[in-house]
Image: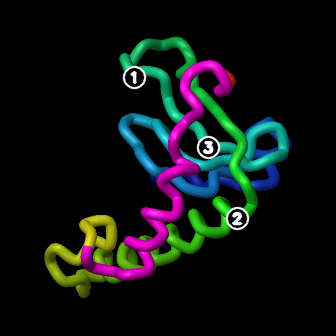
Amino acid sequence: MAETWDEQQLTADGFERVYVDLEWCDGPRKGLAVVDGAPHYFEGLDHDHADEADAYFVWPASYVAVAMEREQWAVFARWNDRHEAGTAEPGSHPGSGGIDVRYDELDLLLAPYRHAPWPSAATCTA
């Protein structure tokens, strides 16, 4: 049976909001989340299935970037609803390029924000 999560309890336990998962592989690898009360991009340093906590580079995200990320996520979420309902056309994923003009435009606008300022300006956190 799937467990449901209460956002208030998770926050009280020290968890913070994730705005967007940009990459997921056995856990979050890349995305946009709240870190110490402010939006930050994050990117996993490595992925080795070890028992120790994952380490991430994090760097601040502007509120403009957050708004664009959320807009792009909404485009994906609408497609995902259709996909799960079985009504999405094959090959219609907006991330495929050439499918949704605004999604593609947001990809271009977001590209500079999504790159970590490697390596010296980024902060490593576990």
Residue 94 located left or right of residue 17: left
> Which mark is drawn over residue 31?
none
Residue for point 24% across, 87% down: 87
Residue type at the position of mark 3:
Tyr
Q: Residues within 10 Å of mark 1 (few under 14, many from 20)?
A: few
Judge by depth and name the residue closer to the eye, 99 or 112. Answer: 112
Residue 94 located left or right of residue 14: left
The x and y percentages for residue 13 are 80, 37
How much space separates mark 2 and mark 1, taking CA atoms? 30 Å
Q: Which residue is mark 3?
A: 41
Instruction: From this view, report whether residue 40 is shown above or below residue 73.
Output: above
Q: Residues within 10 Å of mark 2 (few under 14, many from 20)?
A: few
Instruction: From this view, report whether residue 121 is shown above or below residue 112.
Output: above
Magenta-colored span: 98-122
SS class of the residue under badge 1? loop
Instruction: From this view, report whether residue 45 is shown above or below residue 90.
Output: above
Q: Which residue is mark 1?
A: 47
Q: Mark 1 vs mark 3: give the one in front.
A: 3
The answer to which of marks 2 and 1 sits earlier in the sequence is: 1
Residue 119 within the segment the image draws in magenta: yes
> Which mark is drawn over residue 64?
2
Residue for point 70% across, 64% down: 64
How much space separates mark 3 and mark 2, taking CA atoms? 13 Å
Residue 87 located left or right of residue 106: left
Judge by depth and name the residue closer to the eye, 118 or 74. Answer: 118
The x and y percentages for residue 45 are 48, 22
